[in-house]
Image (cartoon, coloured by chain):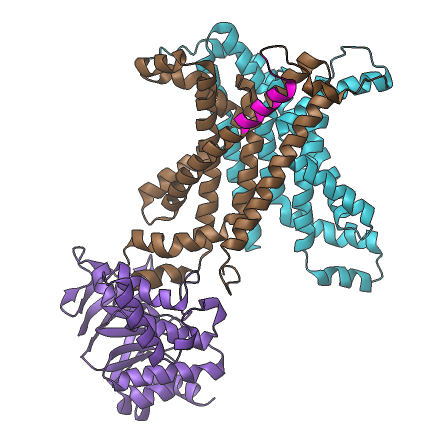
Chain colours: A purple, B cyan, C brown
Amino acid sequence: MITMNKVSKHYGAFQVLTDCSTQVHKGEVIVVCGPSGSGKSTLIKVVNGLEPFQSGEIIVNGVSVGDPKTNLSKLRSTVGMVFQNFELFPHMSIIDNLAIAQVKVLGRTQEVARDKGFKLLDRVGLRAQAEKYPGQLSGGQQQRVAIARALAMDPICMLFDEPTSALDPEMVNEVLDVMTELAREGMTMMCVTHEMGFAKRVASRVIFMDQGRIVEDDSKEAFFENPRSERAQQFLAKILHH
Amino acid sequence: MYDFDWSSIPNALPFLWDGMKISIQITATAVVVGILWGTLLALMRLSPIKPLSWFAAGYVNLFRAVPLVMVLLWFFLIVPHLLESIFGFPRGSDMRMGSAMAGFALFEAAYYSEIMRAGIQSVPKGQMAAASALGMNYGQSMRLIILPQAFRNMVPLLLTQGIILFQDTSLVYVSALADFFGAAYKVGDRDGRLVELLLFAGAVYFVICFTASRIVRRYQQKLKIA
Amino acid sequence: MGYNWNWGVFLQPAASGGDTYLGWMFHGFKTTIALSLSAWLIALAVGAVVGVLRTVPNKWLSGLATAYVEIFRNIPLLVQLFLWYFVMPELLPESLGNAFKQSNPFMQQFLSSMICLALFTSARVAEQVRSGINSLPRGQKNAALAMGFTLPQTYRYVLLPMAVRLIVPPLTSEFLNIFKNSAVCSTIGLLELAAQGRQLVDYTAQPYESFIAVTLAYLVINVVVMFSMRWLESRTRVPGYIGGK
């Protein structure tokens, strides 16, 4: 579904990604982790072209992301994305947040779009909040709405960029639960996250990044029980011991 | 197509420079007096003594609601009358320069006062408490601790306001005072070369104000980093 | 001080026509309002476009928009007015320039004043629009793009609606400014409020009453504008939103 082949990216002299290659198959859940500044966020932002890259190749569902002829908007409408800071649109009600792109991008009617929106809100347990505005919801609720908003576009895969790191601790689980359920249903997912419990439960593979390189790309069992690189061992030691 | 003829400008340069000196004089006076009076107004506005605070609020709101042109007309047409009748100045004495300076200074003070008020409020509350804890009285805390910081934070805004003021001095045109713009207009009118002289004046203002605002911006960025 | 106050002067028949001096003032008032409002509408439209262009990821477009803003911000309003009124007609193609010069004087003054105020203000509006857009969290743009919006759609549905709400307060002061700045147009002979005030001084020899009346008229405009903008602000408030980053 997603193929990355020797993707490199730099800002001026600063190398953000170096020769990153990996493959994500349909139904796989990939957890991307690594120390801050290791390029993990950038790695998933290049997948839907939010960040440009200088060399290498990314194919999403048969479409080349780096090709200037590619209609990026169309590609992005098929890839769901969830952000660290939720990024709901503050001037629209919750249901409008779910409907707007369905109407304006996919050309669905307002009615169909709202209907779908309500169903998804039901699914994340927020049907009652449909007419409220984002600023009136808690962080955890906002992030669940953001997931529903991405799902409303019927994406072929989902990208998560640290979806729980801006949340208060007591809200992390409600978001992870939604993500876990999604994974169980067979959604293809790429998640940047520090939640190792989540990784252990649902990941098919774990990618560990350091200094812009993919250092490990292995099954979760192999990664957690027997990390090969020293950096990954240190990272795991730090993150699992608190 | 219009036939440009720039030849009247070189000879007029000394006259234009005299005009520029007037513009600069008015600007400088209004900046200095405006900041001093404006700071005082800001202190009054923030003072716990109600009448003082009302007076300052009234002053600032009045001047900010009235067009500068109107204020200048007051100062050119009405205030001299008033002074003549009160102090018995000889009729028709030329008070235009003084009027211009007074008008601009009093008008700008209202704007400077708002900048200084924001500046004073931008200083963390703890600073005042710390100064009091050291045994300083209100006046000392303001003068030694709060105002220097407020002023420092607001320097870019005060300078930007100065640039706006410099542009606004061209409005002394309503009193036929020959500032830089007035001089340019007079030369253009005399030689039938208004087009060239106005374009020249516009270019000169642009170069001065653009350069000045660039310098302010650079200073502002330095301040942000520090 | 020996001054004869006479507020009844406003009801006396004016020197020309069948009008009273109050009628003159009212004429000036209407001109000020018409001029300021028409210029404001143009300023909003042009300013929005220029402000958006300053934020687009295209060096040429944003550079062009920056140059526009710098030019209109760094030349005094009075000079700009004279350039529009005295210089522009000379530089236009001859037929257009002549047509302008042959139209009636009020039309010439009004048009020049309107264009001048509109473009002068548009540069300031553009700055507000730009800072409004830039004050939105960066992720908003990414979120919209990630959902498949094109860049124009992102501006249309996500960035601008929020930015516009954020800049209502600073735009209030620009809106007030345009009324005040319109007084500058008295210098090219446009008979708006300030000019009528001046004329009243000449005709009635009651300078205090004339100027006080005109000054009060500006205060009234000020208060009305302030209250209507405050109303607009409360109407457009986003529930639960506490400001940008």
Q: How many marks on residues?
A: 0
**What residue do we see at 58% from left, 55% from top?**
B226
Please name whichever residue, C215 or C134, is drawn nearer the observer in this view of the structure: C215
Residue sitting at x 24%, y 74%: A157
Relative image position of residue C63 (x, y in whole percent): 36, 40
- The residue nearer to you, when weighing C104 against B6, is C104
Question: Among all residues in the image, which is located at the extreme top?
Answer: B191
Q: Quadrant of the N terminus of chain B?
A: top left
Residue A85 lies, with reference to residue C180, above or below; the image says below
Name the side, left or right, on which B220 lies relative to A50: right
Q: Position of residue C161 (x, y in %)?
A: 41, 53
Residue C28 inside the magenta-drawn segment: yes
Estimate the x, y position of residue B50 in percent, counting from the top left.
Answer: 81, 49
Q: Residue at x 68, y 19 (%)?
A: C11
Is residue C62 visible in the rendered structure shown here? yes
| Main secondary structure type of the part rendered in magenta | helix
Picture quadrant where residue C88 is located: top left
Extent of the magenta region: C18-32
In magenta segment, residue C37 = no
B4 to C119, vertically: above or below: above
Question: What is the x, y in percent for residue B152?
Answer: 66, 48
Residue under the image location 34 percent in, 68 percent down? A98
The answer to whether residue A39 is visible is no
